[in-house]
Amino acid sequence: MNITEIYKLYSKNYLVDTDTRKIRENTLFFALKGDNFNGNKFASEAIKKGASFAIIDEEEYHNNKTTILVKNVLETLQDLARYHRKQLKATIIALTGSNGKTTTKELINVVLSKKYNTKATKGNLNNHIGVPLTLLSFTPDEEMGIVEMGANHQKEIEFLCSIANPDYGYITNFGKAHLEGFGGVEGVIKGKSELYNYLIKNNKTAFINSDDELQVQKTNNCNTIHFNSSIKLIDASPFVKLSFNSNIITTNLIGSYNYNNIAVAITIGNYFKVLDVDIQSAIEKYTPTNNRSQIINKESNYIILDAYNANPSSMKVALENFARLESKFKTVILGDMFELGSSAEIEHQYIVDLADSFNFENTFYVGENFHKTTTKNKKLISFSELEDFIKKNPLENQKILIKGSRGMGLERILNFID
Ligand code: ATP
Ligand code: MG
């Protein structure tokens, strides 16, 4: 069966699923393979649970009634998304960058939803599977689509652009994340810039922050829309407050690094003619989820939980921001940053030197990478060591910043802090 035929089946309901635990009626089930599972084995279960067809790539699971045998299920999913995108009338905005993609995506989503039928990437579905799934979740009814694109190596963004065909693009920043796969910071800049290259080649448009030299430099040959120049940061202690076109916006977002994320959402809202009052109310209502910079008020401590992810650039801004908070009694608990390859040692030491320089009342470093650094502060090799330590030495009346890579699971420490 070719893509046009599969598209006919898909476009009856515009539903695709890849997980039999969350399958929907009349969906097309794509039997993807992972390191630890083979979707082909679940094809018959998918049909029992209501899928209309299962797309598979192993002959032994094939029957002529409910399965469609293709060469490669993943490639078929990507081809179907590419084909579907070409039929869509929605304006697509693509986002990439080292930090702040999901936050920015959510902000643009709430703003544009005030005026348009808008759909965005769900959660963090931003890779070679997530981007196709995102596009396939769009129906002919949507007017605006926002697609988050993640990458940890070269050519990935170029490939995702070939599927999503964005009309507009924005790169949040060129930071120190996934240094291992990209080959250093220069590699990150090159890899992320694939979005600009795509926009240039196809005569599309980038949103840019004129204060960011790299954004300006890399979009030299691109159509650009600059941030609304009236947007000014007023305060970030800890919640960001800003003004634009004589409106004051008070947000639930922590840290001045969120300024750019909010500014681009306002700029895009302005550009697509969403009313200022609607932009304001959408942003004021937005609250981040998923351990992305949440405030947790415990009985005795005030916690900024930022344990969703961490890399040298987001760690640096989080620390600088925390240092600006008013309080003598501050504690930071930092967990290892992953995926740094040969830069791991230097980058962990850099963060230790920065954090030490603030002389917080308590500074704890958790994980094997931090354990190798030189510091005057406390090092704990694992989460369980941290847990034991905090149980024996309870924190009281502190403002606490918790940040580390997802895999460190630092949010678990909340169970041991009152
Ligand atoms: P992922 O790579 O996991 O998809 P992401 O790019 O989608 O991450 P978010 O989930 O929006 O990023 O934010 C993750 C963390 O990055 C935040 O909790 C915050 O610490 C930091 N962060 C957010 N925005 C910025 C920014 N503009 N610059 C630097 N750090 C940021
Ligand atoms: Mg994300």
Image: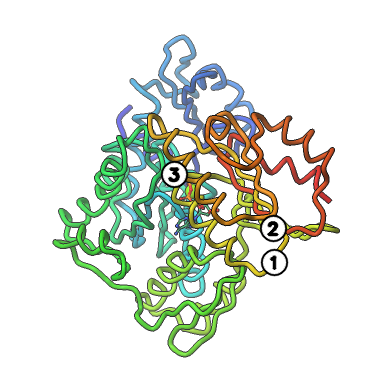
Binning the other alpha carbons within 10 Å of mark 3 as few (below 14), some (14 to 19) or many (20 upward) gives: many
For numbered disc 2, what is the local secondary structure?
strand
> Which quarter of the rendered picture does the N terminus lie within?
top left
Q: Residue at x 40, y 57 (%)?
A: 140
Do labels 2 and 1 touch, CB within 8 Å?
yes
Residue 347 x/y as whole percent: 44, 40
Q: Residue lying at the far top in this picture: please name it.
A: 60
Q: Residue at x 48, y 63 (%)?
A: 257
Quick check: 299 left or right of 244? Answer: right
The span from disc 2 to disc 1 (Cα, nearest Å) is 7 Å
Identify which residue, 207 or 359, lies in the foreground: 359
Q: Residue at x 43, y 61 (%)?
A: 142
Q: From the viewer's perspective, is the residue at label 3 or at label 2 nearer?
A: 2
Quick check: 74 left or right of 242? Answer: left
The span from disc 3 to disc 2 (Cα, nearest Å) is 35 Å
Q: Amino acid at mark 1?
A: Ser
For numbered disc 3, what is the local secondary structure?
loop
Identify which residue, 7 or 314, lies in the foreground: 314
**Figure check: 245 above or below 332:** below
Q: Residue lying at the far bottom in this picture: please name it.
A: 246
**In the image, the residue with mark 3 has its CB under 8 Å from the nearest atom of ligand 2:** yes
The span from disc 3 to disc 1 (Cα, nearest Å) is 38 Å
**For mark 1, what is the residue?**
327
**For mark 2, what is the residue?**
330
